[in-house]
Amino acid sequence: MAEQASSFTDRLGARFSGARVVVAEPRGEVTLEVAAAEWHDVCLALRDEFAFEQLSDLCGVDYLGYGSDEWDTSDISSQGFSRGVEGKAMGRFAWGEFPSAESSEGAQPWSMPQQRFAVVAQLISYRHNQRLRVRCYAPNDDVPVVASVTDLWPGVNWFEREAFDLFGIVFEGHPDLRRILTDYGFVGHPFRKDFPLIGNVEVRYDEEKKRVVYEPVTSVEPRVGVARVIRDDARYQTAAGEVAKPEAAK
């Protein structure tokens, strides 16, 4: 039987006094935020003392611009909505360019977090029918470093390599930390928010050189992330009203 979230969070808080316990209601999802220096020790305790036998997933997160939006969706008309940010926001810039620090109105187009990169692990305890999310922030944004937990859960090997490849997070103590998804010689980390969405290079086959060549992107325009907006749909009310009219006339 699953332990109640309140009892579980109390045990976590008592065991890891320096950590922060967050519960997302109404789902009761529990997140344990720990310092990077305590990451490995906390994970070891969670495995051995709290019986979290399995690490089902680990990923990197780039919080640059977290909570910001390129679009202003507060005033939507039948013609749609207009762009809320001028300038080159996250990902919206071409090869050789960089995100602008300010928009044309002088406002900063995205938020700057105190700590940019984080590592998030999803743990499962089959013995106690319990799930837990564990998160830590890398202390250095220039070279984000977090201890590897491959010695605790060997299956995390490729997850850590993926986070290294896509976010540039270095896992200290990893037995074979190298890229796993991008091509050989790839420059940059494509899931970082300051990486252009169109990429840095494009690939084509050169007939003269008889090989594949990499060149700066010229055939793709910088992309803009479009906000998902849910508008009121009156079709069902209209259809119900049309059905009701003949009934009322009888």
Image (tube, rainbow, N blue to C red):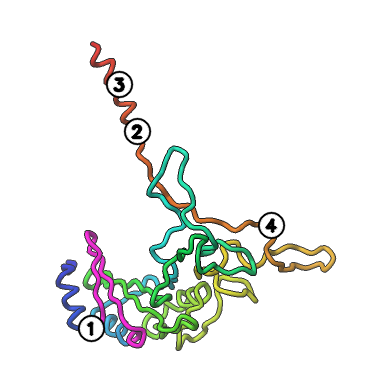
x, y (%) of residue 115? 39, 77
Is residue 22 within the magenta segment? Answer: yes
What whole-number distance in Å separates the C-alpha atoms at marks 2 and 3? Answer: 14 Å
In this view, the residue in front, 193 or 171, is 193
Q: Which residue is mark 3?
A: 243
Horizontal relation, residue 211 to residue 218: left or right:
right
Are discs 2 and 1 less than 8 Å apart at CB? no
x, y (%) of residue 187? 61, 75
Indicate whether 153 appears above or below 28. below
Q: Which mark is residue 234?
A: 2
Q: Which residue is mark 1?
A: 16
What whole-number distance in Å separates the C-alpha atoms at marks 1 and 3? Answer: 62 Å
The kind of secondary structure element at disc 4 is loop
> Could you tell which of marks 2 and 1 lies nearer the N-terminus?
1
Indicate whether 45 appears above or below 247. below
Check disc 3 and give the amino acid type. Answer: Val
> Could you tell which of marks 4 and 2 lies nearer the N-terminus?
4
In this view, the residue in front, 110 or 47, is 110
Q: Quadrant of residue 65?
A: bottom left
> Could you tell which of marks 1 and 3 lies nearer the N-terminus?
1
Check disc 2 and give the amino acid type. Answer: Ala
Indicate whether 45 appears above or below 10. below
